[in-house]
Amino acid sequence: MKEFQFGNTKVIIHSPLALMEKEEQKEWFQQEWEKKNPILRSIVEAAISCQEDEK
C-alpha cells in the first residue's frame, strides 16, 4: 500500500505495482502485455483514447 496526500485528498494505492522500482514496473508491464492481459490492454486503450480526444 502506498499513500499520497494532495491537499485535503488522500490517495491510497493497494497495488504492489506502486511499490516496485521503475525497472521492475517496466518488466511487469512487458510481461503482462506479452500475456495479453485484458485489463492492462483496456487501460492502455483508455489512455490512448484520452490522448486522441485532446488533439
Image: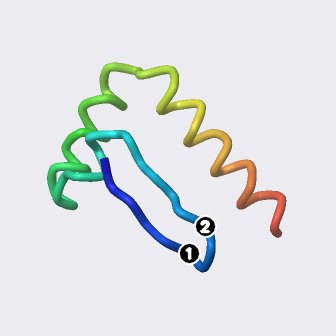
- How far across and how far down the image is residue 44, in percent? 56, 42
Q: Residue at x 52, y 31 (%)?
A: 41
Pointer 1: residues within 10 angstroms few (<14), some, or many (20+)? Answer: few
Near-viewer residue (4 or 38): 4
Q: Is residue 22 above or below residue 6?
A: above
Where is residue 43, by image quadrant? top right
Q: Residue at x 50, y 20 (%)?
A: 38
Instruction: Please tell me how many numbered marks the rendered image carries.
Output: 2
Secondary structure of the residue carrying tag 2 is strand
| Side of 30 where 44 appears, left or right | right
Near-viewer residue (50 or 14): 14
- Residue ID for mark 2: 9
Label annotation for residue 32: none
Pointer 2: residues within 10 angstroms few (<14), some, or many (20+)? Answer: few
Q: CA distance from mark 1 to mark 2?
A: 5 Å
Q: Residue at x 25, y 51 (%)?
A: 26
Coloration mode = rainbow
Secondary structure of the residue carrying tag 1 is strand
Q: Do the CB atoms of the residues marked 1 and 2 lie less than 8 Å apart?
A: yes
Where is residue 36, by image quadrant? top left
| Side of 23 where 43 appears, left or right | right
- How far across and how far down the image is residue 55, in percent? 82, 69
Q: Residue at x 16, y 50 (%)?
A: 24
- How far across and how far down the image is residue 7, in percent? 60, 79
| Side of 23 where 48 appears, left or right | right
Tell me the kind of residue under disc 1: Phe
- Residue ID for mark 1: 6
Q: Is residue 31 above or below residue 1?
A: above
Tell me the kind of residue under disc 2: Thr
